[in-house]
Image (tube, rainbow, N blue to C red):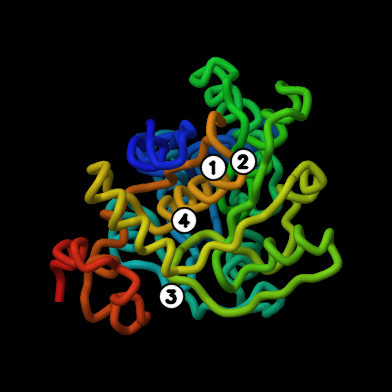
């Protein structure tokens, strides 16, 4: 999708890959299918088995769809900070949802570690380990990257998106770098509270967290195995504050008529910054991860926005979209 207002303003072609159109409603459908089929190929799960994953929501939703289609049971561990819309959808898809306290990865009670232990205790079960299972990255080397190249006719100069597992960012970066002979620039987009920006900017010398973010499912406190093989390919990083993310979310709704979640808005904000840095005439592509309907009770709630001190970041003419109490 061409983001018309931003493209016209910058003199660049700013394009968003509409991953919210996938069957499960997000970019994570790709990784979900690949990690399950990887487990099948390796003989890690048999018919009627159980898929277990730790996820902030969208990978779990993708896995729940795949499990329904393939006849597996699905257990999802997720931080209890995630939106109720995601939890409800997972339950509707038949998943056993287990919200747990949100703690850092180095804490043994982190949702990923709880998912791993659960799978180890069950017969015919597999922990798909989306963060460090490189079948995730492979999904984007084989699908997302080639699709972007084909859909732009090879006329792409820059790619940017945020990282959570880093499967989308790393896999797409790897393909685009290889197919273009290194010509396509790759910028990592990062929310507050994540170490990716400082790690890339310092060439691996620093891992500074600093703050927290309203975004869900992106940002990272470590270098995952999905990112590690390709991090040397990354040209630069952009730190996108929540104020820019929420402003872009409301602007895209008003000017483009597209209803996107916060991670998608962050990605578009990063593409906007990348376009301004690279200059007119360039084509920049980013990922529209999912829609706002999974977060609408927060993103369009006056009370919630006030609690995050973000009402002031929304221009006056866009505050008409704050329709929830």
Q: Position of residue 255 (x, y in %)?
A: 25, 46
Image quadrant containing the N terminus: top left
Q: Earlier in the sequence, mark 4 or mark 2?
A: 4
Marks 3 and 2, how far apart at CA? 40 Å
Is 133 placed above or below 216 here? above
The residue tagged 4 is 266
Q: Tag 2, which secondary structure?
A: helix
Q: CA distance from mark 1 to mark 2?
A: 5 Å
Q: What residue did someone put label 3 on?
A: 80
Residue 65 screen position, x and y as percent: 39, 41
Residue at image mark 1:
275
In-image side of 11 versus 5 (left or right): right
- Compute the Cα span from label 4 to label 1: 14 Å
Residue at figure coordinates x 41%, y 44% from the top left:
26
Crowdedness near tag 1: few (<14), some (14–19) or many (≥20) residues, C-alpha within 10 Å: many
Name the mark on residue 278.
2
Which numbered disc, 4 or 3, marks the residue closer to the eye? Answer: 4
The spot of residue 75 in percent (x, y) is 47, 58
Dot 4 or dot 1, earlier in sequence? 4
For mark 4, give the secondary structure: helix
């Amino acid at each position: 999708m061409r983001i018309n207002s931003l493209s016209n303003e910058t003199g660049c072609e700013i394009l968003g890959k509409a991953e919210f159109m996938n069957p499960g409603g997000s970019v994570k459908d790709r990784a979900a299918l690949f990690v399950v089929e990887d487990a099948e190929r390796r003989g890690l799960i048999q018919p009627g088995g159980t898929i277990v994953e730790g996820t902030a929501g969208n990978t779990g939703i993708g896995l729940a769809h795949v499990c329904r289609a393939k006849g597996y049971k699905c257990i999802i561990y997720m931080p209890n900070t995630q939106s109720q819309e995601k939890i409800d959808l997972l339950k509707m898809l038949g998943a056993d949802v287990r919200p747990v306290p949100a703690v850092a990865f180095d804490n043994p009670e982190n949702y990923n570690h709880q998912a791993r232990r659960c799978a180890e205790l069950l017969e015919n079960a597999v922990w798909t380990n989306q963060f460090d299972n490189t079948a995730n990255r492979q999904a984007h080397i084989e699908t997302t990257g080639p699709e972007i190249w084909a859909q732009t006719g090879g006329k792409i100069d820059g790619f940017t998106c945020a990282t959570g597992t880093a499967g989308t960012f790393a896999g797409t970066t790897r393909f685009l770098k290889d197919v273009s002979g290194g010509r396509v620039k790759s910028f990592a987009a990062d929310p507050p509270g994540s170490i990716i920006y400082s790690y890339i900017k310092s060439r691996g010398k620093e891992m500074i967290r600093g703050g927290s973010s309203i975004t869900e499912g992106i940002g990272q406190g470590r270098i995952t195995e999905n990112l590690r093989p390709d991090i040397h390919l990354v040209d630069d990083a952009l730190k996108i504050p929540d104020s820019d993310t929420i402003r872009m979310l409301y602007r895209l709704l008003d000017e483009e008529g597209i209803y996107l979640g916060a991670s998608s808005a962050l990605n578009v904000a990063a593409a906007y910054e990348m376009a301004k840095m690279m200059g007119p005439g360039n084509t920049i592509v980013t990922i529209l991860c999912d829609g706002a309907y999974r977060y609408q009770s927060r993103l369009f709630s006056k009370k919630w926005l006030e609690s995050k001190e973000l009402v002031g970041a929304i221009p006056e003419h866009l505050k008409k979209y704050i329709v929830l109490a």
